Structures are given as C-alpha cells and as structure tokens.
Image (cartoon, rainbow, N blue to C red):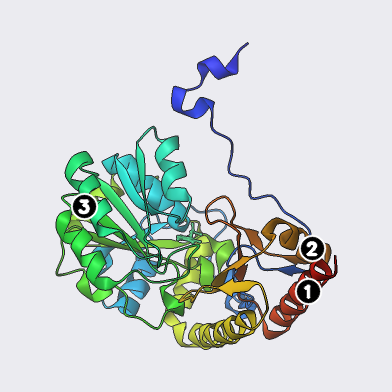
C-alpha cells in the first residue's frame, strides 16, 4: 500500500520536526531557562483531580493572566504552547502568511502543514524589518497573517517599533507580535498598544522563562479576535497540571522575574566575553540567547559538542552562525572555555 499517495499533497514531502535529543553535559541549544521552580509543583494533588477533565476554558488561569497583564479574561486564549496558537491562527484565518527571515521556523512549517502559502521577506543588514519589501508583499499578496518575533529568534534583536507600526498600519490582515523573549528585553513590548490597533495580537509563552515542560502559551488580543480563534481550539487543549502550575506562575511572577534578571545580566557578560574572542562576532541580544558568527562554524559546533557543550547550529538560516542559550554562570563559563579551546586548536593546525 502506498501511504504517500494517500497523504495530502502538501504533507508528502514534509519531514517531522526533529527535536532530537543529543546527549550533552551543558545544554544551551533550545533557549530554555537554566532555572526551574520545582516548589511550584508542591501541593498539586490537593487541587488537581486526575480523573476529571481540565477546565476547558482555563478560567482561573485566564483570570490570573488578565490580572498580571491588566487585560480582561476575554482578551486571552490559552494554548498548548504558542506553537499550538500559531496552528490555530493559521487554521482559523488561512494564508498567505508573511514573516521576515530568518525567524522562528514554526511560522513557515505550520503554514506548510496546513497547505497555506508562507512568504518570507529577508531582514535588512542590521536584522531589522525591511518595511519596503514587506509592504510590497502586503499590497500584492494581501497576507491574512503576519508574524513578527520581537525579540527575534534567532537574531536576538527587537525590531524597531516604528517599523512594526508601519507594518500594522499597512496590513489589512492580523499582525501577530510574538513576544516569547520579551521578558528578557529592556524595551517596551506591544501590550499597551492592543487597544490602539484592532489588527494586533500578541503571543507570550512560559517556555523560555522556566516552564518549557508545561506547554503553556497565550494569545492576547481584542475579544472579537480571541473568539474567532477560539472556534478552532480543541476542547481540552491545556491539561490540568499545566493550568494549575501556570496559575502559580502568574500569581508569583515576582519570584520568576528575579531569575530573569540574573539571565539578562549573564547575557551581557557573555556578550562581552564573546566579543573578546578572536574570530568570533556576537550580535547584540534582547533575548536569552546570543547569535554569533564564527569561522568554521560547523567544526566549532562539533568541537563544542565533543566537550559536552551543545549549542544550536544556525548555518541553515544565517551564514557561519551558531546560537548559544544563556545558561547559569557556571554553564556559560564551561561554554566560553570550550569555545576558546576549540578555536585555539584550530589556529594551531
Ligand atoms: C521558543 C519560541 C516560542 C515558544 O513556543 P512554545 O510553543 O510556547 O514553546 C515561540 N516563539 C518563538 C519566537 C520562540 O523562539
């Protein structure tokens, strides 16, 4: 039986997303936080019933999140990670889907899975939005959805807010500003502009701030937009354990923020150290990772791995570049020492 002929055409040539587990000592490849909060799991047995379905609407979590972001619960949709929200957005509105490149790969991947056209417009030389290029596509292709990751993964910078406004104003479709890394940024996010632009939506996630295992993401927008996306949401998309922990995260955000400040400070230190290494060019970052250019990036990636340090190879999207997640001070030291070793070994050859 030829399964391939049964598959929908747009799925035939797709490969599954490979998030393969590479064994390593120091894991700096996935922009996770090095700090967990195991004490937030205590007492869950008193509030979560394993035999009952979770609250399909996540009401308590929406209330807690609304308080934290000064919104109404009706302005919030909860997803099984923001990946699921991207899936729901494209399912609900369809394409074309516009995004700058390089950026978070899921915008393009999910477009393809759903058989919708994804259009990538390259960022300019300083990794900011090419507003000319993007508005041209907006005029000609009329994208239903535009995804702007700011701070952007993998480049680390925020797009200039003036350029983001221009895109929002030029678009008749929905502009989704993905603020997965906003908690690490020194710049203003777009939250306070939700009232001003009715085609603006914002995504937030718990994945980068210490809770990647929960799979909890948020879509924040005006109520009509949230209700529209909610039509395609599966009934119990966020499990009860994740909802319960996420409520605690929202209520006790001050404790989380302390860890975020440590990470942002470490990022600055890591950046300065990288700058001092011959042959390495780091790019300024407002996120919890740093993109850097290095000679022989592929060999450097291998060399680091042979020393137990895993970083992300970004050569597929940015030439000669690797991306390192900010870890604990100890992990960052191990990364820097290994990098210096790998590079000096190369120089001797
Ligand atoms: C990591 C990341 C996410 C997170 O997705 P989740 O599904 O919430 O884990 C979203 N957007 C960007 C740009 C990311 O880098």
Q: Position of residue 141 (x, y in %)?
A: 22, 40
Quickly name the residue at label 3. 135
As rendered, which of 142 and 128 lies closer to the eye? 128
Distance Cα–Cα, label 2 vs label 3: 42 Å
One can see residue 36 in this view: yes
User: Residue 303, labelled with which disc?
Assistant: 2
The image quarter in which residue 282 lies: bottom right
Tell me if 276 is positioned left or right of 123 in this view.
right
Residue at left offset 50%, top offset 56%: 239
Q: Position of residue 40 (x, y in %)?
A: 57, 77
Residue at left offset 39%, top offset 32%: 115
What is the quadrant of the C terminus in the image?
Answer: bottom right
Residue at left offset 32%, top offset 75%: 189
Distance Cα–Cα, label 1 vs label 3: 44 Å
- In the displayed structure, 313 sits above or below 145; it is below
Which class describes the residues within 10 Å of circle 2: few (<14), some (14-19), or many (20+)?
many
Q: Secondary structure at mark 2?
A: helix
Identify the mark nearer the N-term, 1 or 3. Answer: 3
């Amino acid at each position: 039986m030829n399964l391939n002929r049964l598959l929908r055409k747009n799925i035939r040539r797709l490969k599954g997303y490979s998030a393969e587990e590479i064994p390593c000592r120091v894991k700096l490849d996935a922009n996770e936080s090095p700090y967990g909060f195991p004490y937030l799991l205590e007492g869950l047995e008193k509030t979560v019933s394993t035999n009952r379905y979770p609250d399909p609407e996540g009401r308590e979590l929406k209330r807690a999140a609304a308080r934290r972001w000064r919104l109404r619960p009706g302005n919030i949709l909860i997803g099984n990670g923001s990946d699921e929200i991207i899936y729901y957005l494209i399912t609900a509105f369809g394409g074309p889907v516009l995004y700058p490149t390089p950026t978070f790969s899921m915008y393009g991947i999910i477009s393809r899975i759903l058989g919708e056209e994804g259009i990538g417009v390259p960022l300019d030389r300083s990794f900011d939005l090419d507003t000319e290029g993007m508005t041209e596509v907006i005029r000609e292709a009329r994208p239903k959805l535009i995804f702007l990751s700011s701070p952007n993964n993998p480049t680390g910078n925020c797009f200039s807010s003036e350029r983001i406004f221009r895109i929002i104003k030029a678009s008749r479709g929905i502009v989704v500003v993905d603020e997965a890394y906003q908690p690490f940024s020194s710049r203003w996010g777009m939250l306070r502009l939700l009232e001003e632009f009715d085609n603006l939506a914002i995504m937030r996630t718990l994945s980068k701030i210490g809770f990647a295992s929960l799979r909890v993401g948020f879509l924040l927008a005006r109520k009509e937009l949230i209700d529209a996306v909610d039509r395609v949401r599966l009934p119990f998309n966020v499990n009860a354990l994740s909802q319960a922990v996420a409520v605690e995260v929202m209520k006790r955000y001050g404790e989380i923020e302390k860890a975020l400040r440590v990470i942002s400070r470490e990022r600055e230190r890591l950046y300065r150290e990288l700058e001092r290494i011959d042959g390495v060019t780091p790019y300024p970052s407002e996120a919890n990772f740093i993109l850097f250019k290095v000679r022989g990036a592929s060999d450097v990636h291998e060399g680091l791995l042979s020393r137990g340090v895993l970083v992300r190879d970004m050569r597929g999207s940015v030439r000669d570049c690797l991306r390192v997640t900010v870890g604990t001070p100890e992990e960052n030291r191990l990364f820097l020492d290994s990098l210096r070793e790998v590079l000096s070994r190369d120089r001797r050859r």
